[in-house]
Amino acid sequence: GQAAMEWACLKCTLQNGATRHTCAGCQTLRPTDAPSDSAPTNSCPICCEEASERHYFPCTHWVCPTCSDRCVKCPFCRWSMCGTVRSGWIMKQSRHLKKWRRRWMVLKGECLETFPTQDTAKTTEHWKMSTVEAKPGDNDTDFVIRGRSTSHWIRCTGPGEREAWMTAIWATRAAIP
């Protein structure tokens, strides 16, 4: 069963033996496959704080949006998050006219892309994750994405959204060998 399997640290991604309760590399506590008895049944099995009903890994292990944004691989089965890691509506400042435009942004394991609509296949921007940097802006809703030769300002709906996007970008970038 699940108890006999190795587990991966959410902080440093080191594989640990099934009997370890803390990571051998960084001493982070082991994530659990089941919520504690005191947690609600729909709580995230990692943090046991947020509801896990809205977000799931491609392998169908359910977690909350916060924990999902921090993971590049499923902490339970190590399934690679090469599919969509995060997606949502943002505002992106145009390169030449500096106008703010609503865009659908998609973060995948190896790229970050923006689209005019959620259903469009043609991108308005495409960045390889190996060349992307994300830096906070001057206010709590903006951040800048820097690629090899371009920079683009992104505006989120609030500070929590900005933090979630930047955390997901940093985690995805850190996972690239």
Image: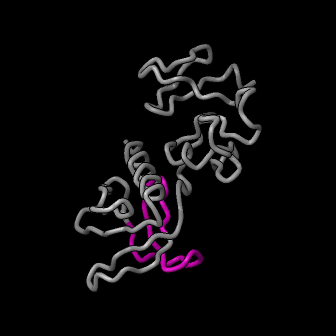
The quarter of the displayed image where residue 101 is located: bottom left
* 126 over 64 or under it: above or below: below
Magenta span includes 108: yes
Q: Position of residue 55 (x, y in %)?
A: 64, 51
* 5 over 69 or under it: above or below: above
Left or right position of 59 against 129: right
Q: Position of residue 29 (x, y in %)?
A: 53, 23
- Can you name the residue that lies furthest to the left here? 149
Q: Residue at x 38, y 74 (%)?
A: 92
Q: Residue at x 70, y 46 (%)?
A: 60
Q: Quadrant of the C terminus?
A: top left
| Residue 146 appearing in the image | no
- Can you name the residue that lies furthest to the top here? 19
Q: Position of residue 42 (x, y in %)?
A: 74, 42
* 102 over 134 or under it: above or below: below
Left or right position of 3 against 154: right
Magenta span includes 67: no
Magenta stretch, residue numbers = 105-126
Q: Residue at x 57, y 74 (%)?
A: 118
